[in-house]
Amino acid sequence: MTKISRPTAKKAQQSQEATNPHSPVVDFGAGKPLHLDSGVSLSPFRIAYQSYGELNADKSNAILVCHALTGDQHVANVHPVTGKPGWWELLIGPGKPIDTDRYFVLCSNVLGGCLGSTGPASINPETGKAYALDLPIITIADMVRAQAMLIEHLGIKQLFAVIGGSMGGMQVLEWASSHSDKVFAAVAIATGARHSSQNIAFHEVGRQAVMADPDWKEGRYLEAGTVPRKGLSVARMAAHITYLSETALHNKFGRNLQDRQKLTFGFDADFQIESYLRHQGTTFVERFDPNSYLYMTRAMDYFDLAAEHGGRLADAFAGSKTRFCIVSFTSDWLFPTGESRTVAHALNAAGASVSFVEIESDRGHDSFLLDEPEMFSTITGFIRSAARARGLLPS
């Protein structure tokens, strides 16, 4: 049996507890192991989470928010490391589409993450050192199993809704497939039922950038007192390009020069887009663990719901009584609309209740994190309709 316990020290690479003092945590001991897809039982392990609003008397108003690859549980509060607003404060809060005056909203740091939940920076009690790459590979299904244990720990028998975008959307689809009796409504945004070959390729470039950094130390950088900053920064830069669209990049940066009137004929950041990407890479290193990046990208690469059901995606949702809302964006080339249509068609084939909306946007994959009025109105309408059906709002 593999054992993992408490995290180690400094910002994203350091003590997850110390950088995240405001997140409650739940420790699952030896009596409650998590059985992973890799065949390993993980015990003990820890899940950190944030919650907003209050549970009603029968605990029927809970909404689980699933975060994306580089996100965390701080969905609607000031981030304890960066000091920035929560990553989905536009959507979640009092009087917002997901109204915390009405619903109990919960978001956990995924298993394998780096802000409180058990991940590669956690200490292995058998060695007294950071687990690093000895942590078993984590899948999307493993993340959801851990979340299901958290939900059960909180005494919630059925979630009113599960919502997420990108990797969070993968978790939503896994929830609806593997735990359909525990999900009344599901909102999957800018996602797909499997990772494409192109997406796997981009992730591999990022992983190789991290592992090629001499400071990576075969994953043992915490013991060596180093951080593979350059490698992780390059990985973030490459990934960030996929989150945007060519139109968004052109509109925001074009070929504008950065703080200069003419080209330097060198390799400094002559262009604004170069400076922007370098900034994205540098700031990311301050809040994210490099090994967690390897684990999170691998989890997305392994995700393939149809393959888990004999190659027929509809079978993943057979008999589901969950209400679905699937949302895509026209300029998203990381998870193009065709991926969402495939999910919607599979849900139709399974006889599930599904709404599908393609939103016109030129801002690419990251549209789901931005001020997109049509997305907000879609989610507002879907949540209200589901709440009436669930008896949380008058019909």
Image (cartoon, rainbow, N blue to C red):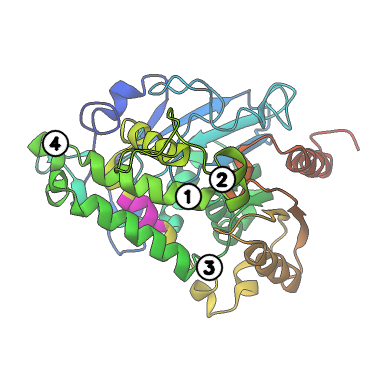
Q: Which residue ends up furthest to the right in the rendered image?
A: 395
Q: Which mark is first along the chain, 2 or 3?
A: 2
Report the quarter where the N terminus lies: bottom left
The amino acid on which the numbered mark 4 sits, given as a three-letter code, is Thr
Residues at circles 1 and 2 in contact by the CB criterion of under 8 Å: yes
Give the residue pinned by disc 1.
241
Distance, label 2 to label 4, CA atoms, is 34 Å
**Foreground pick, 56 / 271:** 271
Q: Residues within 10 Å of mark 1 (few under 14, many from 20)?
A: some
Disc marking residue 119? none
The answer to which image quadrant residue 316 occupies is bottom right
Give the residue pinned by disc 2.
249
Give the residue pinned by disc 4.
226
Residue 326 in the image: above or below residue 317: above
Q: Which mark is first along the chain, 2 or 1?
A: 1
Residue 315 in the image: above or below residue 64: below
Instruction: Please tell me whether mark 1 or mark 3 is closer to you in this view.
Output: 1
Q: Position of residue 111 (x, y in %)?
A: 38, 45
Q: Position of residue 201 (x, y in %)?
A: 39, 65
Give, as a single range, the part of the protein colored magenta: 294-299
